[in-house]
Image: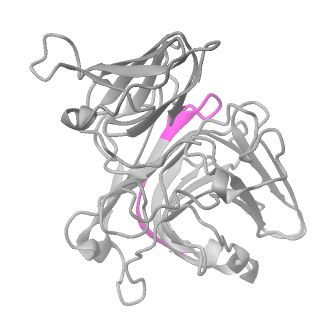
């Protein structure tokens, strides 16, 4: 147990209450320079406008009153700055409001019934302290959760079981060599298979690309073996959050940045999938989540198994939407390779391979009749929601 945190975190940590914590998968690259959902009016949050890859963040200024707090996303990273003035610690948290409102959605993450993870690219411009935290299975009412914590001043990387002001360490490792000034990746995963009391919490950090992870976890804690289940009963709620903290004990400020957040059901994998999207007489296409590919252009890149929604939203001129053509997975030499057409304006695709999708619009005359089962053979039908 990290006694210095227990002794110096005051009761104000209990004010970390998230009334509308995210229950569904979400992504954010902060490309709009905002931590709020509506870039045109960052003071307005409408839960009916839930956007899986541009969610609404709430920033919680905790611990350290009086202290200096500051946050922004001006450079495409969520920056959280906290400087303790008259107290030993200053802590900031960030949580996503609401989430996928459909309780039947396969992307809704509300309990411990299946694996899920949170991943982020992080940066520590000033390594004098810069504590970084990610949380899983957290409760908005009691401020509990499983936590991965990276301390830039000594490069300690650890898993904790958080219960308000009590942070119980489960496992740790010293990870020297992380590219703190330019950014590195951290991932916290709940395995969630079989008996939840004997599931594992795992974590890794690595440099380079998102999929440069070596495949082996740096640290892993079995819930039953790692913590006293009487004092620390297994957590069953699905919230997640980010955290940044500074300390006068080691001297200085928390000035940390987060980017490319990914919170979703399933196990994280090094396998990435490419979606290539082409338009014929369609001027704009809705894709959620719309995750950039390093090659840019027509390509998007996803973690294996990610559910994607495509919506042909804006035909060019007086044209109307005609059809989708989906080719894949992989290439024409693959025995699973197929070409399927669909005349529905919205399709749902599971990225279990590499796909090419073409949206075709035509001169006015209406949309062709319903095409039947269409993409079932491609393993689709993951209901996230219909784009608005």
Q: Is residue 24 above or below residue 331?
A: below
Give whichever of 74, 110 is nearer the camera: 110
**Residue 275 seen from this side:** no
> Does the magenta-highlighted stretch encompass residue 174?
yes
Q: Position of residue 283 (x, y in %)?
A: 60, 15
Question: Is 357 left, or right, of 24 in this rendering?
Answer: left
Q: Is residue 25 visible?
A: yes
- Residue 163 place in picture, x, y as percent: 54, 79
Which region of the structure is painted magenta?
167-185
Would residue 33 appear left or right of 357 to someone viewing this image?
Answer: right
Q: In the rendered image, which quarter is residue 352 located in?
A: top left
Which residue of the protein is positioned furthest toward the left in this rendering? 335
Which is more toward the observer, 217 or 363? Answer: 363
Q: On screen, 33 above or below 57?
A: above
Q: Is residue 381 magenta?
A: no
Residue 11, position as x, y percentages in the image? 73, 83
| Quarter assignment of residue 276 | top left
Give coordinates of residue 249: x percent, y percent. 73, 63
Q: Specify the farthest residue to the front.
A: 365
Tell me how many marks there are: 0
Q: Is residue 307 left or right of residue 245?
A: left
Residue 179: quarter of image: top right
Question: Is residue 281 or residue 197 the one in the foreground?
Answer: 281
The image's colour scheme reads: one colour
Residue placed at 29% from the left, 39% from the top?
A: 380
Of the pair 11 and 294, the residue shown nearer to us:
294
- Could you tell me which residue is drawn at 46 percent across and 23 percent down? 300
Could you tell me which residue is drawn at 76 percent across and 40 percent down?
34
Residue drawn at the location 58% of the way across and 49% of the way down: 154
Vertical order, 164 against 206 (above or below)? below
Quarter of the picture holding the C terminus: top right
């Amino acid at each position: 147990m990290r006694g210095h945190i227990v002794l110096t975190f005051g009761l104000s940590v209990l004010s970390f209450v998230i009334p509308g914590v995210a229950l569904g998968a979400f992504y954010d690259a902060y490309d709009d320079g905002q931590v709020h959902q509506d870039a045109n009016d960052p003071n307005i949050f409408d839960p009916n406008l839930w956007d899986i890859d541009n969610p609404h963040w709430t920033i919680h200024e905790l611990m350290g009153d009086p202290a200096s707090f500051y946050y922004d996303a001006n450079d495409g990273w969520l920056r959280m700055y906290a400087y303790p003035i008259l107290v030993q610690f200053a802590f900031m948290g960030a949580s996503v409001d609401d989430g996928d409102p459909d309780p039947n959605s396969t992307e809704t993450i509300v309990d411990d019934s299946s694996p899920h993870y949170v991943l982020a690219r992080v940066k520590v411009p000033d390594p004098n302290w810069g504590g970084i935290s990610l949380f899983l299975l957290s409760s908005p009412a009691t401020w509990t959760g499983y936590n991965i914590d990276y301390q830039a001043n000594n490069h300690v990387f650890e898993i904790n079981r958080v219960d308000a002001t009590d942070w119980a360490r489960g496992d740790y490792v010293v990870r020297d060599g992380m590219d703190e000034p330019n950014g590195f990746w951290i991932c916290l995963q709940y395995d969630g298979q079989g008996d939840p009391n004997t599931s594992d919490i795992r974590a890794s950090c690595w440099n380079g690309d998102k999929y440069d992870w070596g495949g082996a976890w740096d640290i892993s804690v079995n819930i039953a073996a790692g913590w006293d289940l009487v004092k620390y009963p297994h957590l069953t709620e699905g919230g997640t959050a980010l955290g940044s903290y500074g300390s006068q004990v080691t001297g200085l400020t928390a000035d940390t940045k987060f980017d490319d957040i990914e919170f979703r059901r399933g196990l994280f994998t090094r396998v990435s999938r490419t979606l290539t999207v082409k338009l014929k007489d369609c001027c704009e296409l809705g894709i959620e989540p719309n995750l950039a590919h390093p090659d840019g252009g027509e390509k998007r890149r996803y973690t294996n198994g990610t559910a994607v929604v495509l919506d042909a939203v804006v035909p060019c001129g007086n044209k109307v939407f005609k059809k989708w053509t989906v080719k894949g997975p992989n290439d024409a030499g693959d025995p699973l390779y197929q070409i399927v057409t669909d005349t529905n304006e919205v399709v749902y695709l599971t990225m279990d391979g590499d796909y090419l999708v073409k949206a075709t619009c035509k001169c006015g005359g209406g949309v062709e009749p319903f095409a039947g089962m269409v993409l079932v053979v491609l393993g689709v039908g993951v209901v996230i929601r219909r784009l608005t």
